């Protein structure tokens, strides 16, 4: 795997300007694209490329499948250490909740993240990002939530911003201060309440003022924060005009999705235990359902998210890696496409929309990402595949031929 040290700086990569021909769209039809000044100028049938683009260089795609750049809309990419030993504990029979209650879980990553310098966090996250980008990711969400103090949450979010600049990828940052109770609050009579007060009163306003917060998330769960605490964080976010999202109904039905919908949440994520009332509320508010097959798989969960009911209600479904060291050490969004189909029974078009258009919407990026959008910076992927079905079918290979990210040939070559 190339490391961040061996890759050319984002700005040094070749321009993608030109007429891209011999491509096949996800519908199987021949398609051509025109990129000029790094912007996608035109999409259409190969024999209809407007004459005004005739002088541009031509890039022959050799019949490659072309899709929009992928969007990974839920990751915890920046953290210290890793948790392979907990994986082994769980294999020996311990549940995720038991590991968390025994002082492992999120809090052990908090320890390692606090100990790591900003540069060390940047280097380790950079290496992981390289793997995700190699799968055609052009926009990614990165959450904090392993610092759990103002200084350490800031450190994570600053790294997320640096990753965007260094790798030439769109990054949306999400403040997840309400991810777990920090150890220094754990023994207090009102530890959870005190910590949520600090999240709302001190941490969120300060990080927002520094331009580090694009959205706010909470882990609403029995082993994390209550519905009332979640609402307190949502109110603070709303007061600052920041959109919210929620880790909702992963291990139990807390009613989090309906609450999030009341706050116009961009997305509710995990949702294995989502109720019909939650689905109806999400439909009304236009909230995206983010499915995370990597966490479902790693936890050897058996409680499927209510896919049929989400489909029937017309709630948009996104698919993401949920990359994190505890429950989803996944570094391939293409693998998640396969798993969303195999484990969750999404159709191929649903899974593809899940990592493109609906994922973009889960980040509020639908105007710029997740589709071939004329007038926007060019973000698209050429695949060494004959059809969209193949994208979901193979697993374990890296079928990317070439990625155009922000108007530059960022991975591979023609
Ligand atoms: O998305 N659900 C909570 N947060 C993460 C897990 C984080 C961890 O275990 O470190 C998730 O699965
Ligand atoms: Fe998560």
Image (tube, helix red, strand yellow):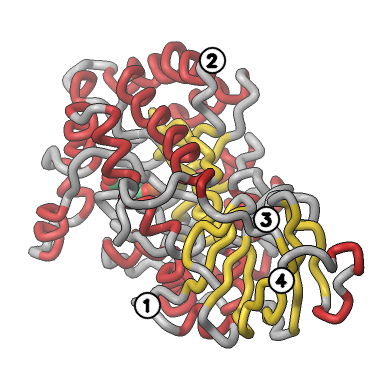
Q: Earlier in the sequence, mark 2 or mark 4?
A: 4
Q: Residue 36's mark?
A: none
Q: Mark 4 or mark 3: which is in front?
A: 4
> Which tag is nearer the camera, tag 1 or tag 4?
4
Q: Position of residue 362 (x, y in %)?
A: 60, 49
Q: Is residue 275 visible?
A: no
Q: Nearer the viewer, residue 330 or 249?
A: 330
**Mark 1 or mark 2: whose residue is earlier in sequence:** 2
Nearest-to-viewer mark from 1 and 2: 1
Instruction: Report the Cα–Cα distance between label 1 and label 2.
Output: 43 Å
Mark 2 vs mark 4, CA separation in Å = 46 Å
For the residues marked 1 and 4, what is the alpha-carbon distance in whole angstroms? 29 Å
The number of discs equals 4
Residue 26 screen position, x and y as percent: 66, 78
Q: Residue at x 15, y 55 (%)?
A: 84
- Identify which residue is drawn at 46% across, 29% down: 228
- Gap between marks 4 and 3, in whole Å? 16 Å
Q: Position of residue 386 (x, y in %)?
A: 57, 87
Tell me the SS state at disc 4: strand
Residue topped by disc 1: 397
Identify the residue position indicated by label 3 in the image. 378
Count residues near mark 2 (Cα–Cα under 10 Å), then give few for <14, some for 14-19, many for 20+: few
Q: Give the residue number, with chain letter if any, for mark 4.
A: 58
Residue at disc 2, secondary structure: helix
The image shows residue 232 at horizontal and vertical percentages of: 50, 23
Residue at left offset 62%, top offset 66%: 353
**Sequence-earlier tag: 2 or 3:** 2
Q: Which numbered disc, 2 or 3, marks the residue closer to the eye?
A: 3
Q: Is residue 207 above or below residue 122?
A: above
Q: Residue at x 43, y 33 (%)?
A: 162
Say left or right for 262 vs 330.
right
């Amino acid at each position: 795997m190339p490391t961040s040290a061996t890759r050319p700086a984002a700005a040094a990569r070749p321009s993608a300007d030109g007429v891209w021909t011999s491509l096949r769209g996800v519908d199987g039809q021949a398609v051509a694209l025109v990129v000029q000044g790094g912007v996608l100028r035109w999409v259409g049938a190969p024999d209809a490329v407007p004459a005004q683009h005739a002088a541009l260089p031509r890039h022959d795609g050799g019949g490659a499948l072309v899709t929009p750049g992928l969007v990974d809309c839920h990751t915890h990419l920046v953290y210290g250490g890793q948790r392979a030993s907990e994986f082994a504990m769980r294999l020996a029979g311990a549940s995720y909740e038991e590991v968390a209650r025994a002082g492992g879980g999120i809090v052990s990553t908090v320890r390692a993240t606090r100990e790591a310098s900003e540069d060390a966090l940047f280097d380790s996250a950079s290496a992981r990002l390289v793997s995700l980008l190699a799968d055609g990711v052009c926009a990614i969400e990165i959450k904090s939530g392993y610092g759990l103090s103002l200084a350490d949450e800031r450190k994570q979010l600053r790294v997320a911003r640096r990753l965007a600049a260094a790798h030439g990828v769109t990054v949306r940052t999400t403040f997840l201060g309400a991810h777990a109770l920090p150890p220094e609050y754990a023994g207090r009579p009102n530890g959870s309440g005190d910590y949520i007060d600090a999240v709302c009163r001190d941490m969120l306003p300060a990080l927002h003022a520094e331009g580090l917060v694009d959205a706010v998330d909470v882990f609403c769960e029995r082993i994390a924060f209550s519905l009332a605490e979640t609402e307190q964080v949502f109110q603070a976010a709303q007061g600052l005009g920041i959109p919210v999202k929620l880790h909702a109904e992963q291990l139990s039905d807390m009613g989090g999705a309906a609450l999030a919908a009341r706050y116009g949440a961009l997305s509710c994520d995990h949702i294995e235990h989502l109720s019909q009332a939650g689905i109806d509320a999400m439909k009304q508010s236009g909230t995206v359902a983010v499915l995370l097959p990597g966490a479902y798989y790693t936890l050897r969960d058996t409680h499927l998210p209510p896919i049929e009911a989400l489909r029937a209600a017309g709630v948009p479904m996104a698919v993401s890696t949920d990359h994190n060291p505890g429950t989803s050490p996944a570094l391939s969004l293409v693998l998640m496409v396969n798993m969303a189909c195999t484990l969750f029974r999404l159709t191929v078009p649903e899974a593809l929309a899940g990592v493109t258009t609906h994922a973009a919407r889960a980040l509020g990026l639908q105007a710029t990402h997740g589709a071939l959008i004329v007038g926007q910076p060019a973000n698209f992927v050429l695949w060494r595949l004959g059809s969209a079905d193949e994208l979901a079918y193979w697993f374990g290979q890296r079928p990317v031929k070439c990625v155009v990210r922000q108007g530059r040939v960022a991975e591979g070559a023609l």
